[in-house]
Image (cartoon, grey):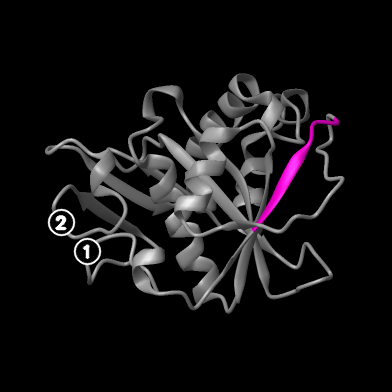
């Protein structure tokens, strides 16, 4: 299984990745001094999740089925409850200041109940192209493997070429399933990543 950080760090808590530290797939995105940390957003970190989640629904509304009005007036307890139910990871230069987030959930598709679905992926504009989203996604993939999932799946906007390129680099492949649209009617692509691939693929 891929390690999102150096050997010996606990991916369920936090890890650091620095260019040249041997973290496959990330070094090309980091400056020599830039460090990427990732950590799980537990319910006690609901404030962090609330801030970046509401930003994502403002800045990248077209990428999500949920709309800002569904969440902007909810109490912090609702964000904490969501984190209790849906494993969510953040990545950033400092723990406590997320620059990217990703979540996953199981049993969303009766075709394969052991497939974990990648959800709510978002990177703040200043963090894009710097490896933060990839670090959050890798943490999600590791967590889903640890939970016994045998593959990961996702739906992505067909016009989001940057995200599609990232997912392909991580090993996801298009399923060719036709007719997929999101809640706004925008065409989507389904992609799947079978687990059990060599470490350098994850």
Task: List the single residue furthest toward the front.
Answer: 176
Residue 110 position (above or below residue 137): below
For mark 1, does the 10 Å Cα neighbourhood hold few (<14), some (14 to 19), or many (20 or more) residues? some
Residue 147 - label: none
Query: In terms of secondary structure, where does tag 1 sit?
Result: loop
* Count of residue discs: 2
Q: Which of 91 and 71 is in front in this view?
A: 91
* Disc 1: which residue: 6
Q: Is residue 12 above or below residue 66?
A: below
Label 2 crowd (10 A; few <14 / some 14-19 / many >=20)? few
Residue 20, horizontal then vertical, whole percent? 13, 52
In the image, is 82 to the left or to the right of 122? right
Placement of 57 over or under 190, stated as above or below: above
* First to last magenta residue range: 185-191
> In percent of the image, x 33 and y 35: which residue is there?
130
- Residue name at image x 52 percent, y 31 percent: 52
Q: Is residue 41 among the parts visible in the rendering?
A: no
Query: Is residue 127 in view from this perspective?
Result: yes
The quadrant of the rendering that contains the C terminus is: bottom left
Say whether residue 189 is magenta: yes
- Secondary structure of the residue carrying tag 2 is loop
Q: Position of residue 81 (x, y in %)?
A: 66, 50
Tell me whether circle 1 and circle 2 mark residues in contact (CB < 8 Å). yes
How far apart in space, not on screen, are marks 1 and 2 (Cα)?
7 Å
Provide the residue designation for mark 2.
21
């Amino acid at each position: 299984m891929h390690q999102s950080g150096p050997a010996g760090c606990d991916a369920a808590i936090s890890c650091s990745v620095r260019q040249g530290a041997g973290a496959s797939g990330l070094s090309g995105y980091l400056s020599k001094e830039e460090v990427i940390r990732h950590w799980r957003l537990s319910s006690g970190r609901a404030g962090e999740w609330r801030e970046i989640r509401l930003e994502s629904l403002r800045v990248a509304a077209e990428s999500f089925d949920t709309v800002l009005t569904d969440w902007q007036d909810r109490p912090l307890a609702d964000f904490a409850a969501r984190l209790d139910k849906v494993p969510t990871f953040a990545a950033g230069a400092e723990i406590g200041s997320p620059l990217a987030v990703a979540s996953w959930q199981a049993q969303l598709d009766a075709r394969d109940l052991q497939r974990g679905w990648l959800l709510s992926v978002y990177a703040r504009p200043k963090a894009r192209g710097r490896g933060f989203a990839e670090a959050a996604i890798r943490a999600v993939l590791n967590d889903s493997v640890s939970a016994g999932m045998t593959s990961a799946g996702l739906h992505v906007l067909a016009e989001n070429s940057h995200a599609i390129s990232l997912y392909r680099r991580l090993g996801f492949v298009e399923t060719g399933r036709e007719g997929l649209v999101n809640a706004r009617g925008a065409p989507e692509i389904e992609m799947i990543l079978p687990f059990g691939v060599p470490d350098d693929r994850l």
